[in-house]
Image (cartoon, coloured by chain):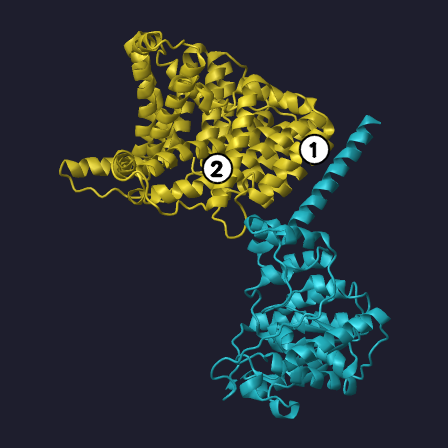
Amino acid sequence: MKKRKELLFAAALLLTTALLLNFASDVLRPVRLDYGSTWSAFRAEPRDSLDVLYLGSSYAYCDINPSLIYAQTGLTGFVLAGSEQPLSITYWYLREALRTQSPRAVLIEGTSLFFDTYQNYTQINVGYMPFSLNKLGAIFTASEPELRPGLLFDLYFYHTRWKEVGLSDIQRALTPAQPDHYKGYTAIDQVQEGVGIAPYVGDRKVDPQVYAENLEWLDKILALCEENGIQPIVAFHPTYTRCTRETYARIEAEVRALDPDALFYNWSEEFESIGLTPTTDLYDGGHLNQDGAAVFSPWLGDLLVEEAGLTPRPQSENNAAAWTESAARWREFLAG
Amino acid sequence: MTFLSPQFFCFFPVTALVYFLLPRRVRNIWLLLASWFFYLCAKPAYLALLLLAVVSTWVCGLLLEKQKPSARRGALISCLLLLFALLFVFKYLNFTLALAGRALNAIGFDFASPALDLILPVGISFYLFQAAGYVVDVHRGKIAAERSFVTYALFVSFFPQLVSGPINRAGDLLPQFREEHPFDYDNLRVGLVRFLWGAFKKTVLADRLAVLVGAVFAAPGDYGALQLIGAAAAFSIQLYCDFSGYSDMAVGAARVMGFRLMENFRTPFFSRSIAEFWRRWHISLSSWFRDYLYIPLGGSRRGTARKWLNILIVFAVSGLWHGAALTFIVWGLLNGLYQVVGGVTAPLRGRVRHALGLRDDGRVTSLLQIAVTFALFSLSMVFFKAGSLANALEVLSGMVHGPLWAFRSMGLDRLELLAALFGLLVLLLVDLRSLKRSMEADYLAVGRPVRWLILLLLLFSIVIFGSYGAGYDAQAFIYGFSF
């Protein structure tokens, strides 16, 4: 009897410790609203409310404003991307996202096919995932080994922030996350000097073995889509940092070989047909700025409806109102 | 794998859990394999040396019991020669060659000493001393030779004490490996809180002070006298927190599994003389030198002059044990010299106290003596910390020359300093309380809510205020991998 009681107390102590550690992590981890990996806002979206998920790297979160797609088509969506995010992490993102959402289509921005096994932002990209088996998968299959202690135990990265923490951080940690109007999008209001005059065309350097591994991860993503009845779309966004046409054609063939039902689009040169002005709508050589995203997103929404055959799912009154407000907010912001 | 590495946090719970789940007859085998795995994680090649030390001293112990008295001395000497030859080759050969080279060059010979690519095996100074102590004790008839190889190998290799001690005595530890250690909640409680207390000292205090000490010692010319004196004092505290923190973690980890290791520190900074200080600082090494070097040299039995000489010899050797460099020898000799001078001037100091109306055991006398002891020890630590004699002399010179204060960063911002002060305050309170009471007994006597509170406060002080993690220049244990 005494032994059992002690065991119960030990379990209670362990549980208390785990809860307090989790709380301390929430307080000390910097808040993340944009530039990708915005998992708190994603998790706050009502369950099974998103029509489309936009995955990939910074090309996804700079170029696609889901609120404007909603305004154009009524399709709800969220950009679940990370800076320089390799496809390995994107695979685990999708798995994790599917725990709470059941999108009808997933758009994967394809530049990450050229990324290295590990890029520069694993700490953010994996670190902000909610703790789950999928996060463990990302830690042990897609993260640098030296980062694993911190990815498993947040305080390893962020405990030194104790000097910066204020009451607002504690309040934030105690308050449940709310859906925001970014929906994973990051607005950039600049145009770098000399951008949009002439595109850079040249193939990105990638080790053939790493490229083959990236294709394997893409294959896994496509298979996961198939398992869940999701229409996969692999696309290259409008950009002035392009690969050669031959490379895009080769990638299209590779994608079709992996999944004949996957849709493939190369919009890298489609500035004119989309209505983009390179000198004003690009932020840098690669990414669109907020004006570019404001043109590209509605165009993309139309394409998703017309070519992928997507129709908006019914939303609760509250959620529909939230999306309408979010769209209005962005229109107002962009008009101002 | 150190006590504060993620690997250890996986290794230790599994090792302890399996230990308690296994039948008694195989528990020691499990602990031995776990200990060797722990050691293998440092570098596989080191294990061969550990095994050589284990096998040679185990065989020597058995031989010592079987041989005639006349042959026993030969066996003992052969074994000790082997152990200390190993230590010499790996730890002192390069130093000796460099010294010889400098000496030959000084007298006109052109000799370039070769720098041999010898990596110091982890913990060699600790486990060789523990094994040497065993064979001497068997030779002296203080203990019987251990028949079981597994038990003996575990005595030398037991992972909590393998890398940085405490250097346990065979008479204390060996019998514990023959006893059953059933799981005990109190052992778990005490062991866990002891481990956390050690981690607190290491991460909140030692590694934070290391930043300040490192900044000042790296450029002593850039700082004022008070900053140099403060850095020397801070280094004494850093070393105490670092090493006693490690010892606490070792004692705590062993205690969780039911083993009691030798205590290595007994609030040394409350000592009233350097002699007393060394009875309370790194006790397992100090007592080893007392039993296996000082007493065989004659101790205090051959007159006062010989006693002082023996003390100087012991402390010179102790300095050398701490590192193969002239700075360590000077540090050791200085600590020996303090005791010689202390002994010689004891009557005079007594007369001065009486003339000033101070009682020998009065509070003022005690505080003065504690302060002087701390100051003397901290002064000697300049040689311990400095990279060279020139660097040490530069620091010491800066303490008496130059400006009192130079307005430049000492590596810690205001909040970091506050965290260090908070840690020091906690340390002071705990050490003061431990002078009169058993902290373990007190911890077990309080109610569960208070125990939980202590445990959680320690844990969260470490995980929030501790120095660890990304972007942090991890400080190895000072008495760790380089000994």
The hue in which chain A appears in the rendered picture of the protein = cyan
Vertical position of residue B305 compared to residue B103: above or below: above
- Disc 2 is placed on an element classified as helix
Farthest-out residue, left: B108
| Horizontal arrangement in the rendering, residue B116 relative to residue A102 (left or right) | left
Q: Is residue B154 left or right of residue B286?
A: right
User: What hue does chain B carry in this figure?
Assistant: yellow
Query: What label sits on residue B206 in the rendered view?
Result: 2
* B406 vs A85, nearest the viewer: B406
Residue B217 visible, this orientation: yes
A133 vs B290: above or below: below
Task: Say few, some or many: other residues with alpha carbon within 10 Å of mark 2 (under 14 / 14 to 19 / 20 or more).
Answer: many
The foreground one among B292 and B249 is B249
Mark seen at residue A318: none
Marks 1/2 same chain: yes
Quadrant assignment, res A18: top right
- Residue at position x 32%, y 38% in the image: B94
The residue tagged 1 is B452
Mark 1 / mark 2, whichever is N-terminal:
2
Res B459 → quadrant:
top right
The reply to whether the C-beta atoms of the residues labelled 1 and 2 are less than 8 Å apart is no
Work out how far the residue at label 1 is from the one at label 2, CA to CA, in angstroms.
25 Å
The answer to whether residue B75 is seen in the rendering is: no
Chain of the residue that carries numbered disc 2 in the rendered image: B
